[in-house]
């Protein structure tokens, strides 16, 4: 990537009409709701009416935009700040140091930029560090930075806390649709994968022509994103518009991935989202993707299939790998598993 003042190389220029034709708008109140998930935790002593209201807010958020900002998640602000700080320190290291953790060709883990899949591919204006963080026995510590020295401990601490948040969210998502407990979580399995992706977006001289991340939906089950605490850029596609996701420093952005859209038989949405660039500030985010155990077959929950809402998707195993194959062939995986 070039430095700020230079014109970006051709490979980064987005040529289709996605900049001009779709109006970006500031969110109208409630378009990306803020949900206090402490209300859903078992130990909460909230009155049932309040719990009901918040569950309805959750159901409505996930079945419209597929996205909300979680507050009351119980992860200390100081830990979130530390996670952002170690990410920043890592990306600020000299290139040789970062390249010690480089991703190999055809590998998913490690440091690098977009993997090349075709000649016409338009590149994202970002570098990333991707790491498997759960199950423990699948961690490849050779990709985990030793510099800064507290990187590993802080990431580990965050993931342990995040698993607790995920448990609360699964139960709440199940309850919001009146499902039997475990309808979603059992499809993920006890050893569902968690991958962390540290995203680094340098400033870019042509934000009108270059994207930090092109429009995509996540191939995960669920994604939790810690945004930069100052710099926005994330947009969600909702009601035919790109909507800016506001920066709320200690909130976690929850967006569903394709596999939750499948499991919920299309009731919950896996939103398209993208990241804009800007001319003067770098942006860092930490996305964590929770994905069902690859060998487990997932599919629409039976309770969500009836005459009025027939089964939309067939059962599928290892959707994440399938999704990647589709992407390489220019196909959309969710469309391919439709009945
Ligand atoms: C992603 C992603 C958004 C962001 O990593 O899949 O959509 O704000 N990131 O960095
Ligand atoms: Ni994403």
Image (tube, grey):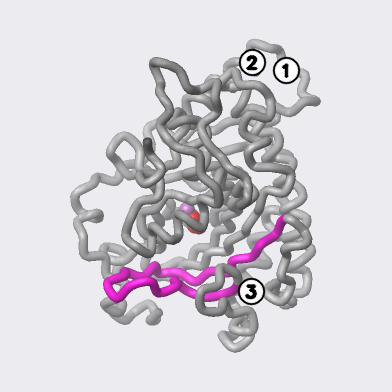
Residue highlighted by disc 3 = 90
* 44 left or right of 300 in image: right
Q: What element carries label 3?
A: helix
Q: In this view, does 255 lie above or below 310?
A: below
Q: Which of marks 3 and 2 is nearer the N terminus?
A: 2
Would residue 298 be seen by someone viewing this image from the given angle?
Answer: yes
- Quadrant for the C terminus in the image: top left
**Of residues 17 and 83, the one drawn nearer to the viewer in this rendering:** 17
Marks 2/1: CA–CA distance = 6 Å
Task: In the rendered structure, find residue 46 and report the number of the disc placed on it.
Answer: 1
Residue 214 image point, x, y percent: 36, 59
Residue 132 is a magenta residue: yes
Q: Is residue 2 above or below residue 28?
A: below
- Quadrant for the N terminus in the image: bottom left
Marks 1/3: CA–CA distance = 41 Å
Labelled pair 1, 3 in contact (Cβ < 8 Å):
no
């Amino acid at each position: 990537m070039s430095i700020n003042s230079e014109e970006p190389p051709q490979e980064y220029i987005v040529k289709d009409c996605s900049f001009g034709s779709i109006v970006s708008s500031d969110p109208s109140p409630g378009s990306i709701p803020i949900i206090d998930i402490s209300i859903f935790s078992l130990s909460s002593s909230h009155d049932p009416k309040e719990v009901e209201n918040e569950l309805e807010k959750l159901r409505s958020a996930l079945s419209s935009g597929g996205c909300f900002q979680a507050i009351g998640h119980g992860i200390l602000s100081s830990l979130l700040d530390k996670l952002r700080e170690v990410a920043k320190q890592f990306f600020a290291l000299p290139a040789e140091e970062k390249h010690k953790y480089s991703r190999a060709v055809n590998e998913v883990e490690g440091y690098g930029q977009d993997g090349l899949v075709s000649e016409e591919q338009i590149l994202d204006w970002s570098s990333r560090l991707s790491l498997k963080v759960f199950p423990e026995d699948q961690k490849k510590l050779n990709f985990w930075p030793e510099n800064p020295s507290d990187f590993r401990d802080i990431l580990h601490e965050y993931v342990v806390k995040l698993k607790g948040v995920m448990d609360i969210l699964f139960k709440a998502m199940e309850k919001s649709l009146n499902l039997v407990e475990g309808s979603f979580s059992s499809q993920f399995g006890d050893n569902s994968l968690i991958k962390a992706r540290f995203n680094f977006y340098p400033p870019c001289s042509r934000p009108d022509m270059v994207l930090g991340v092109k429009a995509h939906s996540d191939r995960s089950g669920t994604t939790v994103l810690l945004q930069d605490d100052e710099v926005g850029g994330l947009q969600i596609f909702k009601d035919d518009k790109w909507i800016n996701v506001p920066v709320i420093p200690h909130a976690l952005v929850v967006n569903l991935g394709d596999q939750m859209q499948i499991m919920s038989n299309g009731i919950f949405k896996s939103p398209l989202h993208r990241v804009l660039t800007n001319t003067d500030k770098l942006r860092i985010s930490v996305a964590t993707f929770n994905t069902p155990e690859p060998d487990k077959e997932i599919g629409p929950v039976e309770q969500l299939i009836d005459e009025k809402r027939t089964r939309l998707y067939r059962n599928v195993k290892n959707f994440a790998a399938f999704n990647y194959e589709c992407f390489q062939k220019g196909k959309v995986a969710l469309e391919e598993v439709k009945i």
